[in-house]
Amino acid sequence: MIIKKPTLEKVTPSFGSSILIKQHLERVDKSKAFWHFHPELELVYVNKGQGKTHIGNHLSYFNNSQLILIGANLPHNGFTDRLTANGSETIVQFKSDFLGSDLTNMPEMSNLLALYERAKKGIRFGPEAKKVIGGKIDELSDFKGLKLIIKFLWILDYLANTEDFTILNADGIAFETNPQDSEKINTVYKYINANFQEHISLDDIAGKVSMTVPAFCRYFKKTTGKTFTQLVNEHRVVHATKLLNESKMSISDICYECGFNNFSHFNKQFNEFAGKSASQYRKEIKHIIQ
């Protein structure tokens, strides 16, 4: 079992509402993004944008759009690096019992409860779901009171019954909270995000959290279920997928741009992470409909 120790974030809806809706119409600066969790579920829809997705043990790059449901207490980072023309990011945060415990436990709500349970591992919805639901999520901020609840319930009902989804953390994830450990792991993730294109020595990263190298290696493996090198390489490969999507750089140039200093090692890491070579990934990009 993987143990995560992120930071608790307090979510406060506006007065008179049980749902918090946030919408960004301009670039979202994720330089201050941090590894966190909250007891509320979080529905995220990006209609046009690019960014890296880090939810639980899942790390990937997305281009154009994405629709994700993050379960209660599932640790995650921010999403959008930037929005394209006419792009927006809408976030809806709500508790599983926002309707009240009596209504939530009705037999008619069984599909909804099953959705909440699946969301504990993170759910990414596919193209058809995004087509049906995306615009309705963007419009939620236009409603208040009972109309908002009715509109939102329709969205949840659709998501609870569609089969157009992928579970992001198939092995599941659990964690314990500890403020001191939360600060450490957040420091590590921020340092990786800022420096993965360069060589990061274990001495450097261990020093950032005031630990010896052996103690840091044990701590990091216990906290993330991965070695530090594995996670750094994942960040590099995800950045490579970003460059393969967005640039016309050669694959060899992308290799070195992402922090790899050996092309054969890059190919091996990319294959292990993506299940295909970088050249095959680039060939398939134009066929992907998001």
Image (spheres, helix red, strand yellow):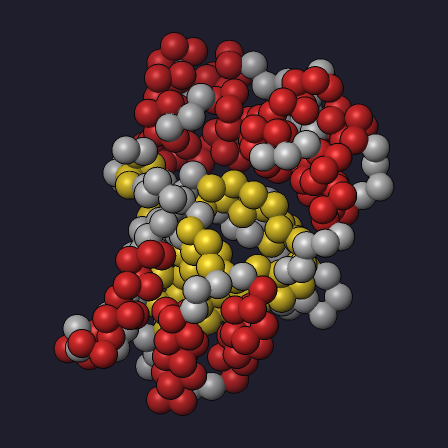
In the rendered image, the vertical position of residue 165 relative to residue 176, given as above or below = below
Instruction: Residue at 28%, 41% (x, y): give it.
Output: 174
Say which of 140 and 238 sits in front: 238
Image vertical order of residue 203 relative to residue 125, above or below: above
Any part of residue 145 in sight = no
Left or right for 16, reference 241 = left
In the rendered image, residue 108, in percent from the top left (x then y), is placed at 23, 79
Q: Residue at x 28, y 58 (%)?
A: 117
Q: Is residue 171 visible?
A: yes
Quarter of the rendering occupied by the N terminus: top left
When the figure is inspected, residue 167 is found, relative to residue 44, above or below; the finding is above
**In which image quadrant can residue 42 be found?**
bottom left
Residue at horizontal 32%, vertical 33%?
2
Q: Position of residue 159 (x, y in %)?
A: 42, 69
The relative height of residue 15 versus residue 171 in the rendered view (above or below) is below
On the image, the x and y values in percent for residue 67 come to 52, 62
The answer to which of 192 and 275 lies nearer the viewer is: 275
In this rendered view, identify the residue nearer to me: 254 or 92.
Answer: 254
Task: Please indicate whether residue 237 sits to the left or right of residue 129 in the image.
Answer: right
**Mark count:** 0
**Left or right position of 244 against 95:** right
Q: Position of residue 125 (x, y in %)?
A: 50, 61
Dividing the picture into quadrants, the one containing residue 149 is bottom left
| Quadrant in the rendering for residue 38 | bottom left
Q: In which quadrant is the C terminus drawn?
A: bottom right
- Viewed as shown, does residue 152 lie left or right of 196? left
Q: Residue at x 64, y 34 (%)?
A: 276
